[in-house]
Image (spheres, rainbow, N blue to C red):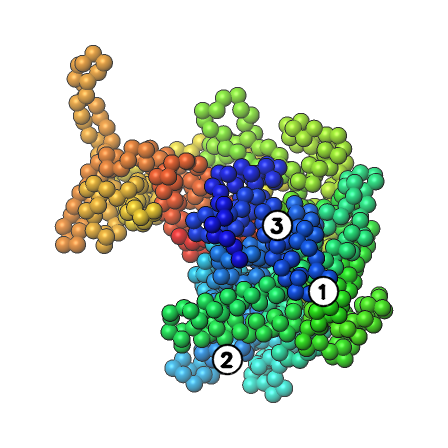
């Protein structure tokens, strides 16, 4: 239990210490502080990630003492420290030893009840919300919902089909907060379902279903129909011998639609469902263990009410003498750590059961009516039972790309793929060996049966590769029903400062842009954009590319001042040259995934990155290669289908200044009055509109006469008047001065026109100056998405200024169209693109988001 009287730290202390811990990496520092530092609603209790690793080691050691041959706290800490070898991911990292929050340690859940009724569907909706509020990512399949137009015995007469429920589940995701992140959701449907085409098209409408990832469960029968050009029969129910409804379609036509949509928007993802079920060890145990859908990123196919926790091994940490001629991989240490990491995974299941018991206790103590708590209570009991019956784990890796580069291997080459496959084979064999040892010491998972698994292809490969391991497993059993996965290690890889999962490096060097303040002198201007803003570009290096530079005698500070062509020549000498996500031969990468998949009993989350000019035919080839190569799923991302923040050095565009005169302001403008509250203060924004777009903005605290504006007033006119006043010159002589004055006119609740004069005098002068600044960029036609970015980039220290910034950002977001994209760094996965939808900003990669 945590001592709540323990020492706490200020944010400033933590930021300073953690920035030093991460060697000046501000992004890693920010992610750790926001997501993983131990805290309650007021205080922070860890100074650096080293404290977190001590916390996790203490809890794992406590569980180890329950069993034979326990590892000590110090032994465990040595494997965790500095993120160098073994890394609990996400929920385990934040939740182990954390009694301040009643949350699950599970990263991934799948739910479902096969009900084709409003009651059953609404129950799934509630279960989704209950899991998300405990920090879980959720997946469920919609193939059980009857297709559109089917008869129903209620006032609707016919079914609405799958798509409206996609929107419902998506909206639920957006409604559930998770401490600065939003829940993640995967929705899937079988290609055999008659509504699958509507499902595939649903996200093509901008702003629709923005709270979910979508994937199609593709069958071998469908793919064979595509290849042969023969018709394909859809039906409902999809697995029925005597379906109520059938529909014959052109398989090639539907396949082309899937390809086009993936080319256009990176969705839907593809799940090769027969491969998933055919290779599944859990499905050997009957229908209740047969996979129904996957988690949001697709790497964990699960049956309903099963869950999984994630842990990754940092492959770069096993490279001795990296980036030198003497570089080699410490395979013996890796094998040892694979067995140790598997023990941690099993320990975490015990810790998860403790967490679920705490959740159930909280539900019992909650004063809410018992009938309202029943769904949540039943849900967690099912999850607890499933966790103990199967003891499923999600052991994986990160830093594959950096490992290969550090060994002098070029990602995507046959030599590199051969080495990667051997690493994953050893991970598999040693993880399974560890699970067998634990079965002997701790007991096998309760439903283990060697006979049920006897013909499973994955188990048979282990039998061929390591006969003794197979014999021991047959005799002692196994502690865990399924063990391995490869997840997208977003925030984990930010803190290991490595490439993510099995992905290659995105870019060894990329350009960041910095706006140049007009007052800055003697600053290099690299280009001027269409709005007349001057920018300087500077290179930022991938962490391990910096290591390569240092190991090869380069002065990084000198390198960062080089011109593009000079830097290109240095990159050509590195093992990252022609080995980036856009350089790697895409078909070869898919084949690499298929080879690694043969050693992973769950699945792999990976993205095939292709350039903007790539054709739909290439996307089709990638998907078809994935199917034939033994992949369980494929996601394709075409550069530019969703814009990003990083600018490739080769992609810099010359931007020339274009003179842009603001349209003259008419005396009167239609205006909108927006009220909001920040830090318990009432605020107002008056937005002048021209040609249907914001033209000017006045904003500040709702004080003085402005507070008399009725809350029902939403519209007004903003009137510009020229006022002559008498002032005195330096000699004391009176002079006439013409000044602008902005008034607002509105109709009150009694239908009487009211005027409030002198907005410039009503608002705090500092806010007024900022309002003039924002109005200037609006009048010159800067797109609202860039206005948003501009305001978000402003840095202030005074609390009341921060309040102003938060308020005006909320106002600006109201005028950004759904589907517009902006730059940033996702605190959840490190993704570099955000999308606006329905007043919320969301990561395009992992569905993190915030609203309001």
* Disc 3/disc 2 C-alpha distance (Å): 46 Å
Mark drawn on residue 68: 1
Question: Residue at point 53% right, 24% down?
Answer: 523
In which quadrant of the rendered view does residue 310 lie? bottom right
Q: Earlier in the sequence, mark 2 or mark 1?
A: 1
Q: Position of residue 845 (x, y in %)?
A: 57, 54
Q: Position of residue 231 (x, y in %)?
A: 66, 76
Callout 3 environment at 10 Å: few (<14), some (14 to 19), or many (20+)?
A: many
Mark drawn on residue 53: 3
Question: Residue at point 51% right, 61% down?
Answer: 103
Mark drawn on residue 116: 2
Nearer the observer, 248 or 591: 591
Nearer the observer, 614 or 239: 239
Looking at the rendered image, the disc whose residue lies closer to the viewer, 3 or 1, is: 1
The single residue placed furthest to the bottom in the displayed view is 242
Q: Earlier in the sequence, mark 3 or mark 1?
A: 3
In which quadrant of the rendered view does residue 458 lie? bottom right
- Element under label 3? helix
- Element under label 1? loop
């Amino acid at each position: 239990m945590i001592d709540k009287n323990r020492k706490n730290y200020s944010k400033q202390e933590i930021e300073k210490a953690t920035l030093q811990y991460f060697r000046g990496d501000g992004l890693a520092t920010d992610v750790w502080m926001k997501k993983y530092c131990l805290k309650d609603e007021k205080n922070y209790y860890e100074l650096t990630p080293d404290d977190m690793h001590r916390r996790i080691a203490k809890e794992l050691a406590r569980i180890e003492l329950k069993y034979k041959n326990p590892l000590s706290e110090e032994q465990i800490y040595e494997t965790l420290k500095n993120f160098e070898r073994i890394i609990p991911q996400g929920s385990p990292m934040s939740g182990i030893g954390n009694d301040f929050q009643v949350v699950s340690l599970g990263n991934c859940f799948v739910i479902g009840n096969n009900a084709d009724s409003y009651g059953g569907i609404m129950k799934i909706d509630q279960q989704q919300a209950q899991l998300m509020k405990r920090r879980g990512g959720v997946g469920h399949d919609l193939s059980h919902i009857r297709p559109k137009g089917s008869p129903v015995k209620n006032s609707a007469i016919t079914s609405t089909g799958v798509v409206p429920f996609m929107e419902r589940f998506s909206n639920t995701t957006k409604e559930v907060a998770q401490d600065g992140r939003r829940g993640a959701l995967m929705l899937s449907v079988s290609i055999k379902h008659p509504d699958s085409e509507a499902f595939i098209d649903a996200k093509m409408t901008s702003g629709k279903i923005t709270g979910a990832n979508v994937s199609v469960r593709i069958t071998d029968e469908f793919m064979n129909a595509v290849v042969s050009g023969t018709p394909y029969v859809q039906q409902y129910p999809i697995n029925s011998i005597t379906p109520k409804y059938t529909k014959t379609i052109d398989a090639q036509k539907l396949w082309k639609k899937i390809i086009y949509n993936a080319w256009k928007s990176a969705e839907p993802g593809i799940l090769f469902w027969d491969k998933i079920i055919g290779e599944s060890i859990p499905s050997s145990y009957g229908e209740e263990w047969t996979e129904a859908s996957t988690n949001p990123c697709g790497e964990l196919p699960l049956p309903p009410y099963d869950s999984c926790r994630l842990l990754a091994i940092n492959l770069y940490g096993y490279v001795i003498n990296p980036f030198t001629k003497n570089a080699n991989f410490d395979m013996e240490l890796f094998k040892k750590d694979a067995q140790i990491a598997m023990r941690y995974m099993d320990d975490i299941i015990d810790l998860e059961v403790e967490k679920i018991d705490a959740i159930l206790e909280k539900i019992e103590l909650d004063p809410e009516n018992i009938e309202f708590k029943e769904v949540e209570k039943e849900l967690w009991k099912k999850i607890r039972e499933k966790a103990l019956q199967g003891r499923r784990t999600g052991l994986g890796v990160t830093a594959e790309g950096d490992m290969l580069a550090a060994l002098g291997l070029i990602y995507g080459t046959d030599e590199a793929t051969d080495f990667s496959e051997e690493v994953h084979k050893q991970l598999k064999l040693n993880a399974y060996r560890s699970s067998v040892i634990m079965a002997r010491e701790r007991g096998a998972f309760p439903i283990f049966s060697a006979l049920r698994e006897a013909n499973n292809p994955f188990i048979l490969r282990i039998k061929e590769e390591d006969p003794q391991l197979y014999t021991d497993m047959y005799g002692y059993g196994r502690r865990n029903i399924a063990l391995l996965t490869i997840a997208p290690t977003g925030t984990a890889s930010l803190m290991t400062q490595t490439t993510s999962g099995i992905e290659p490096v995105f870019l060894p060097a990329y350009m960041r842009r910095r706006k140049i303040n007009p007052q800055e002198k003697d600053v290099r201007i690299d280009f001027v954009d269409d709005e007349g803003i001057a920018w300087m570009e500077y290179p930022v290096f991938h962490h391990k590319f910096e290591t390569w530079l240092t190991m090869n005698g380069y002065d990084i500070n000198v390198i960062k001042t080089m011109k593009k062509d000079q830097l290109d020549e240095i990159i050509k000498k590195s093992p990252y040259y022609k080995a980036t996500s856009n350089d790697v031969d895409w078909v070869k990468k898919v084949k690499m995934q298929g080879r690694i998949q043969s050693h992973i009993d769950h699945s792999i989350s990976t993205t095939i990155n292709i350039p903007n000019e790539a054709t739909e035919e290439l996307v089709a080839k990638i998907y078809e290669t994935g199917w034939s190569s033994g992949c369980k799923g494929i996601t394709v991302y075409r550069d530019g289908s969703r814009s990003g923040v990083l600018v490739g050095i080769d992609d810099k565009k010359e931007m020339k200044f274009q003179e842009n005169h603001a349209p003259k302001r008419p005396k009167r403008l239609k205006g909108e009055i927006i009220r909001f509250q920040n830090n318990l203060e009432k605020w107002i924004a008056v937005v002048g509109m021209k040609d249907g777009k914001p033209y000017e903005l006045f904003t500040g605290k709702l004080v003085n006469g402005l507070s008399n504006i009725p809350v029902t007033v939403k519209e007004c006119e903003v009137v510009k008047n020229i006022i002559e006043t008498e002032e005195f010159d330096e000699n004391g002589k009176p002079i006439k001065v013409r000044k602008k004055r902005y008034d607002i006119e509105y109709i009150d609740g009694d239908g009487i026109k009211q005027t409030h004069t002198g907005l410039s005098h009503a608002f705090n002068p500092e806010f007024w100056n900022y309002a003039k600044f924002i109005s200037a960029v609006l009048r010159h036609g800067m797109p609202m998405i860039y206005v948003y970015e501009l305001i978000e980039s402003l840095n202030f220290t005074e609390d009341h200024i921060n309040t102003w910034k938060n308020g005006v950002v909320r106002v600006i977001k109201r005028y950004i169209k759904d589907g517009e994209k902006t730059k940033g760094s996702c605190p959840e996965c490190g993704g570099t693109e955000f999308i606006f939808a329905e007043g919320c900003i969301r990561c395009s990669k992992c569905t993190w988001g915030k609203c309001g």
